[in-house]
Image (spheres, rainbow, N blue to C red):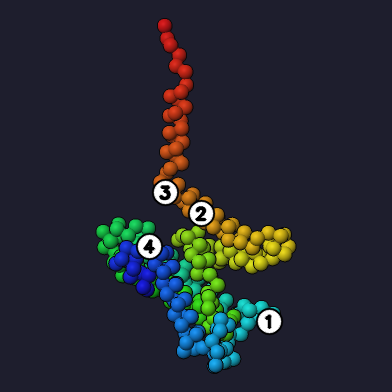
């Protein structure tokens, strides 16, 4: 929500606003871990005292995956697709996302829709953090997000408005993250290679999307054709 306020009224890009607020949130978490919520008698980077067992989410045997978290994720994706593709609210959101000024001229309450989108995304991010705490760590620790927010940002930039691609793309990126842990052991490669692959993939998709929107490729082709035709030898007629 704060990122939305900064974006709309402060003209701050939502990515940079989110990065700044992430640092503020990390500072608040560190204050709680080393301050009011610290372990009895000592404060450490291991986090707070573990929560009560009754608050832990059940997990699939031998894994840290929680069936409740999986169901919530699937339901959230399904509801997102339904709202974006099957409701008037979703139509307005897509119009605002495509062209803010044009949607405002057409009578769509652009500011309200933008703030609603930021609020919904913030609530879903908070829900993901709560599942991370209750299903995996069972306590609050520094850096509990494990940079999943940055990964989700890459996924969102990659899929655009194609919500049905969330699950396969997220699964692919997650597989790269998990597989990167084995790269130094199995192939003697740097584990950061997965991040390079993810960033390169997103970069080329965004470049291709930009080229298609500006017709830059066709303009370059026409320019090249004109250069070739101008260099062809002219035949004199007598």
Q: Mark 2 points at which residue?
A: 203
Residue 188 at x, y percent in the picture: 71, 60
Residue 19 at x, y percent in the picture: 44, 68
Nearer to us in this view, 105 or 227: 227
Task: Check disc 4 and report its element: helix, strand or loop.
Answer: loop
Residue 201 at x, y percent in the picture: 55, 55
Does residue 66 appear in this view? yes
Mark carried by residue 213: 3
227 vs 182: above or below:
above
Q: Mark 4 points at which residue?
A: 13
Earlier in the chain: of badge 4 and badge 1, it is 4
Horizontal side of residue 19 vs 99, given as left or right = right
Judge the density around disc 1: few (<14), some (14-19), many (≥20) Cα neighbours within 10 Å.
Answer: few
Q: Residue at image x 40%, y 46%?
A: 214
186 vs 54: above or below:
above
Does residue 92 appear in this view? no
Q: Mark 1 points at which residue?
A: 61
Q: Mark 1 to mark 2: distance in Å?
A: 38 Å
Cβ atoms under marks 1 and 2 closer than 8 Å = no
Q: Quadrant of the N terminus?
A: bottom left
């Amino acid at each position: 929500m704060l990122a939305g306020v900064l974006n709309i009224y402060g003209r701050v890009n939502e990515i940079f606003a989110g990065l700044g607020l992430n640092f503020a949130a990390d500072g608040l978490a560190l204050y709680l871990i080393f301050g009011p919520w610290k372990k009895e008698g000592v404060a450490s980077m291991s986090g707070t005292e573990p929560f009560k067992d009754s608050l832990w989410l059940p997990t699939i045997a031998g894994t840290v995956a929680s069936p409740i978290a999986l169901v919530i994720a699937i339901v959230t994706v399904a509801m997102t697709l339904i709202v974006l593709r099957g409701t008037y609210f979703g139509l307005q959101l897509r119009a605002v996302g495509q062209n803010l000024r044009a949607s405002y001229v057409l009578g769509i309450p652009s500011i309200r829709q933008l703030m609603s989108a930021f609020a919904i995304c913030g609530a879903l991010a908070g829900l993901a953090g709560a599942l991370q705490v209750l299903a995996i760590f069972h306590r609050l620790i520094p850096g509990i997000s494990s940079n999943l927010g940055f990964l989700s940002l890459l996924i969102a930039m990659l899929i655009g408005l194609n919500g049905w691609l969330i699950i396969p793309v997220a699964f692919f990126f997650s597989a790269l993250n998990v597989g990167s842990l084995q790269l130094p052991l199995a192939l003697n490669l740097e584990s950061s290679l997965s991040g390079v692959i993810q960033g390169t993939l997103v970069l080329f998709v965004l470049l291709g999307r930009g080229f298609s929107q500006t017709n830059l490729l066709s303009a370059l082709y026409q320019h090249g054709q004109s250069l070739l035709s101008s260099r062809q030898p002219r035949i004199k007629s007598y």
